[in-house]
Amino acid sequence: DTGVSQDPRHKITKRGQNVTFRCDPISEHNRLYWYRQTLGQGPEFLTYFQNEAQLEKSRLLSDRFSAERPKGSFSTLEIQRTEQGDSAMYLCASSLVALHEQYFGPGTRLTVT
Amino acid sequence: AQTVTQSQPEMSVQEAETVTLSCTYDTSESDYYLFWYKQPPSRQMILVIRQEAYKQQNATENRFSVNFQKAAKSFSLKISDSQLGDAAMYFCAYRTPRGNFGNEKLTFGTGTRLTIIP
């Protein structure tokens, strides 16, 4: 049984560069969430997919952020023209409707220098 | 908007003792879910316990139990017989049963760092 996986686990990039993160949810989970967690804070909701449809985006998700979930399987989160304020842990979670519980991945820690 | 407040940034407890972590929340909803998640250092977040607001009985999971006070909007976590492996950040979280388009996003508190003293 594999849980939610995220790749890479760590990413260091220079300001202005683009980065892309990947999330593989638990097989057959139709709901997928992205959260962002900064130091000393709890995770904050970014966006949500039901199957391949992106149904809600937080105001935290600026125009530089884009997320996709082609074919309703894995998801990618891209940040363009990174800024130092983007430094955070990016968490992915998935759930199955009947279960309601969200299972979290290990996160991708982004450091923008 | 719903908010979740954890007023204890850090707590410590002797191994084998009992500790209680506090959480309060604000909502105008009558039906919702509350959770405690555990985030060990450099490891992923896992669910510890959950409580449905419509249930009067407090949830329990082995050494973990909650004290859910709906009128006071309070949801504390009690850890009995604390073990070294309990050391982690603990987050209280809230969600409505079904948001926009079925979005069951979680709203988290800022967390409590629990240290276990051997």
Image (cartoon, rainbow, N blue to C red):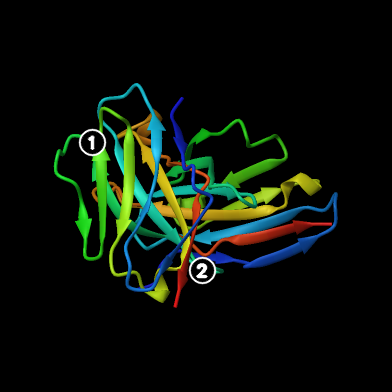
Residue B26 in the image: x percent, y percent?
A: 40, 28
Chain ID, mark 2: B
Residue at 39 percent across and 62 percent down: it is A26
Drawn side of residue B18 relative to residue A18, left or right: left
Quarter of the rendering containing residue B14: bottom left
Q: Is residue A107 or residue B65 the one in the foreground?
A: B65
Residue located 53% across and 50% down the image = B9
Task: Decide if residue B35 is in sight here.
Answer: yes
Q: Which residue is mark 1?
A: B53
Residue furthest bottom as drawn? B118
Determine crowd level at label 2: few under 14, some 14-19, many 20+ residues with C-alpha closer than 10 A.
few
| Residue located beneath label 2 in the image | B43
Label 1 residue SS = loop
Q: Is residue A41 left or right of residue B8?
A: right
- Disc 1 versus disc 2: distance between alpha carbons? 29 Å
Q: Is residue B84 above or below residue A99?
A: below
Q: Where is residue B101 drawn, in percent x and y?
A: 38, 31
Comparing A90 with B18, the one in front is B18
Amino acid carrying mark 2 in the image: Arg
Residue B1, above or below B39: above
Query: Label 1: few (<14), some or many (≥20) within 10 Å?
Result: some
Residue A77 point in image, percent of width and height: 62, 51
Name the spot of residue B33 as percent of width and height, x first.
29, 39
Mark sitting earlier along the chain (1/2): 2
Q: Nearer the viewer, residue A101 or A56?
A: A101
Report helix, strand or loop for mark 2. Answer: loop
Chain where mark 1 sits = B
